[in-house]
Image (spheres, grey):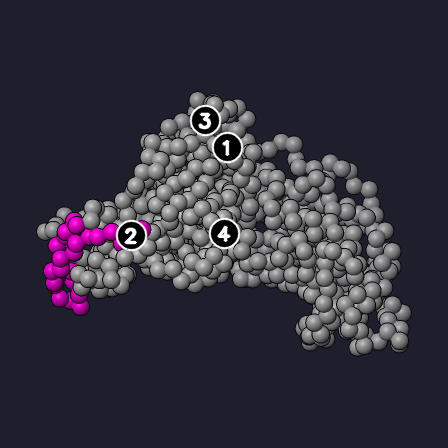
Amino acid sequence: MTCTYIVCGVVFALLCFSPLTLLATVQTSSTDRPTQSEKPSKLTDPYSILSAHYTAVGGLERLKSEKSSYMHGTIRFAEMDGKLKLWVDGIRYRREARYSAFSQIEGDNGSYMWSVDLNNKHLILKDPETLKRRKIRGLLDDFENFNPKSKFFHLSFLGIQEVKSEPCYVIETRNTINRDIYYDYFSVNTLLLLKETIKEPYLEIATFHSDFRKQNGMTYAFRSENEISPTGKKIVIQAEELFTNIPIDNEKFALPEQDVRDFTFTNHLNAEAIPFVFVENNIFLPVVLHGATHYWVLDSGADMSVIDADYADALGLLPKGVLLGNATSSLATFNFVTLSSYRVKGLELTDQTILSYRGLASHFQEPEIVGILGYDFLSRFITKVDYSNRHVSFYDPETFGYTGDGHRIDAPLQNRLFLLPMRVNEIFSGRFGLDLGSFDVSMNYLFAQRNNFLHHKGVKRLSSDISGVFYEHQIKTQSMEIAGYHVSGELISFPITQGIGMNSNEELDGLIGNTLLRHFTLYLDYKNQQLIFEKGDEFNHEFPVDKSGMIVGWSQNNLPEIFLVNDNSPAHQAGILTGDIIIGINGLEGETLPSIVEIKNMLRAESGTQYTLKLLRENEDMTIQLELNDLFEGGKVK
C-alpha cells in the first residue's frame, strides 16, 4: 500500500467503512516517466516498482515533506449525495461527510481514533483490530513498506494484470501485525496507482483512482470509486480542492468535547425496573411512537435501531438512501428514516435517525413487533438487564455508581458490539460478541472449523435473522466460562456453511446470546466499554430444552408446520415428516390449538411426556403418538 493520504476507520459498523484511500496517486508528464534504462516492462522487483512510482509522484523526499493537507469535495454513498471534508496531519485526521439526512464524523487525535455517529453519539475506538490497523497506518505514513528489511511488511511482485484495459504491475503487501493483505496496481505506462485492494478477514475494499491533476509539481487522483464486497456498497469521492502543508489547529483532530444528550428521564434520574416480555429468549420492550405502543426487540447486536418499513410507511416516515448491511448469515437491504421522538417507560429520545427494513415484523409473531432497539438507543445509558425478574433499567452514565459485588470486565466495542473472552469446555477460548438479540450462544463457522467442531455430532436446527433462514448444528457443552463464572451444560450452535455475513467474520469468534446471559444480571456500560456480570437468581439453573428433535414454525396459512426433523430423534421415530401441519394436540384443535410458542414450550417438557398429534399430510389427516426424550447424553447426541 503506497498511499500518501489515507482515510481510515470504521465510521459505523453497519456501513462497514474500512480504510479508504484518497488522493494517493500522481499523474506523470513525459519528463517524469522512467528513463530508457528503467523501462516499465522490465520491472519485476516490487521495491523497484515502488521507487519508480515515488519518482513519478515527484520524489520520495517530496512526499515525506508533505506533512499536512486539507481537501473538500463530494461523496456519494447509499444513493445519497453529500459533502466531504478531510484534514490530515501525519497519523492525525478528521473526516466529515454531511448528507441531507445526517452527518458522519470521525478522526484520530494522535492518541486514539474516534467517531461520531449519525445521531451525534461519541465513541472512542479501542478494540484490538482497530488498534492494529492504526499501527499499520502509522507505519505506512512513515513509508516503512519501502524498507526491504522491514520486520512489519513483506512485498511480492505478482505479475501484470489489467485494470480497465490498462496493464498494471501488481504488488502484494502482507504484514506481521494483522491478517489484512494489500494489493496495489501501478500502470505499466505511467506508474500511476490506478487501483488498490484491501482484503480484510471478512470484507474486501477495491478503490479505483482517476481524474488526475497536477498541482505544485505533484499530481493527485481527485476521484476515487470504492467497491466493498461482499456487501456491494459503493462510495464515490470527488475532490474539488486540495491544499498541502497548511497549518491545522490541534483542536480540529480532537473528539468534540460535548457528547450528545438527546434523552430525558421522567424522574430526571433514571428509568428503573421496566418490565419486559421474554419469549423464545428474546427481550421485548414496549415503545411509544406517534402515540401508539408496540413491542420492539432489545438488541445489543444491532449497531443501529430498525423500524419495520411498512409500519414506517403507515406513519408517513420518508425513507432515504439504500444500504446493504451484514446480518448473521448473509446481507440485508435497509433505508434511513428519522424519528422526531419515541418513548420507553420513564424516558424519551428525540431526533433519531434509524434504519427501516421491509419485512422486519414478519420475523416475530409472538408477540408482534414493529422495531429493534440497537446500539444508538443502548449507548446512551448504563443498561441493567435482570433476566430472573424480567426487568430492564436505564441509568445516566454521568451519575451512575455501581455498588454491587459482580465481576466487571473490559469489553471494547468492535463494530459497536461488546467484545469479551469466553472459554468453552475449559479448552477452546475465543473473542465473542455480546448480543442481547441472539437467541442462544453461537460460534461462527471459522471458529468451529479451527477447533474441529464441524464434524461433531449435533442436533440440526434452523435459525433465522432478518436476512433469512440458515441451518446450524447444536451441541451440548460441558461448561462455558465468562467473566470468571462457569455455567454448566448449556448448548452452543454453529452454522453448517460459512455464509457471507457475521458467521464468516474471522475477527469475531461467535455471539453470546440469552441462553447464557439469562443466568446473570447484566450491566452494559457503553461509556467505559465495560460489562458487569452478577449471578442471577437462576444462575446455573437447568433450563428446559427441546426434546422432540423437530423444528416448528408458521406455515403460509398461519398453521404450525414442521420445517425440520432430525434423524433418530423422537419426532423421526414417531413418523413425523418435514412439511406436516399440526392441526391438533391432545384433542386441542381449531381455536383451542396452542400457538407456536406454546407448542415449543410443550416440546420442552420432561422426558417421557407423550402427546397425541393430529397432522395434515398431503391433504389427509393422521394421528401420531410422540414421546419426548432427551436429545443429549453426556454432551453428545444420543
The residue under label 2 is 633
Left or right, residue 436 beside residue 400: left
**Which is more toward the observer, 108 or 165?**
108
Q: Earlier in the sequence, mark 4 or mark 1?
A: 1
Image height check: is 51 above or below 305?
A: below
- The residue sitting at 53% across, 62% down in the picture is 230
Question: For numbered disc 2, what is the local secondary structure?
Answer: strand
Name the front one of labels 3 and 2: 2
Name the front one of labels 2 and 1: 2
Q: State if disc 1 and disc 3 touch (CB < 8 Å).
A: no
The residue under label 4 is 509
**Which is more toward the observer, 32 or 174?**
174
Left or right, residue 297 beside residue 126: left
Which mark is drawn over residue 405? 3
Identify the amino acid type marked 3.
Asp
Which mark is drawn over residue 408? 1
In the rendered image, residue 617 lying in the magenta stretch gets the answer yes
Q: Which residues are magenta?
A: 608-634
Q: Position of residue 424 (x, y in %)?
A: 44, 48
Could you tell me if residue 247 is visible in this image?
yes
The crowding category of the residue bearing disc 3, from other C-alpha atoms within 10 Å (few below 14, some 14 to 19, many at least 20), is few
Disc 4 versus disc 1: distance between alpha carbons? 21 Å
Identify the amino acid type marked 2.
Glu
Disc 3 versus disc 1: distance between alpha carbons? 9 Å
Identify the amino acid type marked 1.
Arg
